[in-house]
Amino acid sequence: MTHVIPPGVTFELPALPRQLATGRHPAIDRLEPLHDQWMSRNYPFPTEDALSAFLSQRSALWTAVTYPATDEARFHDLSRLTSFLFAFDDLFLHKGPDTAADIKRIFTDMLTVLGGGTATTVYGTALADIWHDMAGRMPARQRQRLRAATEDFGRGCFTEMPSRAPGAVLDLTSYTTLRLEQSLAAWVYFILTEYAAGVDLPDDTLAQLRPVHWACAEHLLFSNDLFSFRTEHFAGDHVNAVCVLLADGATLQQAINQIADLISAKEQQVTDMLRAVRASRLGADRATAAYLHHLEYVISGNLEQARFAPRYHGTSGFIHQPIDGGTVILHADRTGHRSLPGAAVQAPPSNRPG
């Protein structure tokens, strides 16, 4: 994909509707330091600078807004596993292991650990420390499903690698299908949402929820792509819906508008679907109702986090004032933002200073 967006370019971000319930975990100010301590002790960052850079992303805040209603033990599991997967995803973009073969070896070791085996790499050892706690709280069938979904996610990431090559071209439909069916971790997180809710949904329930999950996955994808576009573009990674539209001839503003419209449409679709399921016989089931309660937070929280994520914006300055409608400035190292007049101030995901 070939297109040039110069540093300092601006676009107007439409205000995004938020119809889904939002929240933050009440214990985040105490749980985030525990997450950071674990990452510092256990994850094999190559240098202290790499560790500091990762911790500055405040990734535990993703868990705070996506799983605000889970108990503290499960929160600690989910925050560590999420950060582990974020860091693993970075291996496809940065020079951690030197070759794809090394990444595949690490991934194979991860699957071994999730299957109950013994780790043979430092990455597998770190995952085993998380899994030791999680596996005791997770039903055997759910453990098997999580391992299978993780295997699918990793396979998709490897399949996606050629589309990152210079000159690779996808249209939006092909791109969306590739990401949703292969390399988007949504299907992993749907299982983790069951874990957060303390339920293990049967196959017939999951089959009935498949259309809901697909709409949710699209919401997750477009929300991430809209706000991660800057950092990915300037890093030379153009596997992003905005980049796909730019390569197809759209202007930056046209691409932003189209993705924002898709997010708005998916917000409405997910809202309507959740309402319909809750009003049905399926929604009367206690386990399903608990799951949908947590799933709603996952979808809304992912968008909330994308609006402030230091991982996307190169600054912690949006944690206490997330990006909303207004002018967005794309610097090579950070995002700038000028709010619309009268923009509402929301409660931050954490009281800790940025």
Image (cartoon, rainbow, N blue to C red):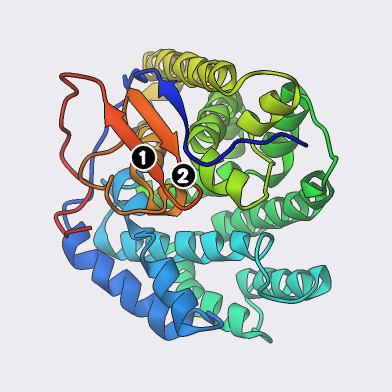
Tell me which residue sits at (39%, 81%) in the image: 40
Disc 2 residue type (three-letter): His
Classify residue 205 by image quadrant: top right
Q: Position of residue 232 (x, y in %)?
A: 59, 47
65 sits to left or right of 28: right
Q: Position of residue 288 (x, y in %)?
A: 42, 33
User: Pointer 1 and pointer 2: residues touching (CB < 8 Å)?
Assistant: yes
Residue at mark 2: 331
Disc 1 residue type (three-letter): Gly
Determine whether 232 is above or below 84 in the image.
above
Residue at mark 1: 336
In this orientation, does residue 232 appear?
yes
Label 2 Cα crowd, 10 Å radius (few <14 / some 14-19 / many 20+): some
Tell me which residue sits at (57%, 16%) in the image: 254
Depth order, front residue of 201/297: 297
Q: CA distance from mark 1 to mark 2?
A: 7 Å
Q: Quadrant of the C terminus?
A: bottom left
Point out the tag, 1 or 2, that comes first from the N-terminus: 2
Q: Quadrant of the N terminus?
A: top right
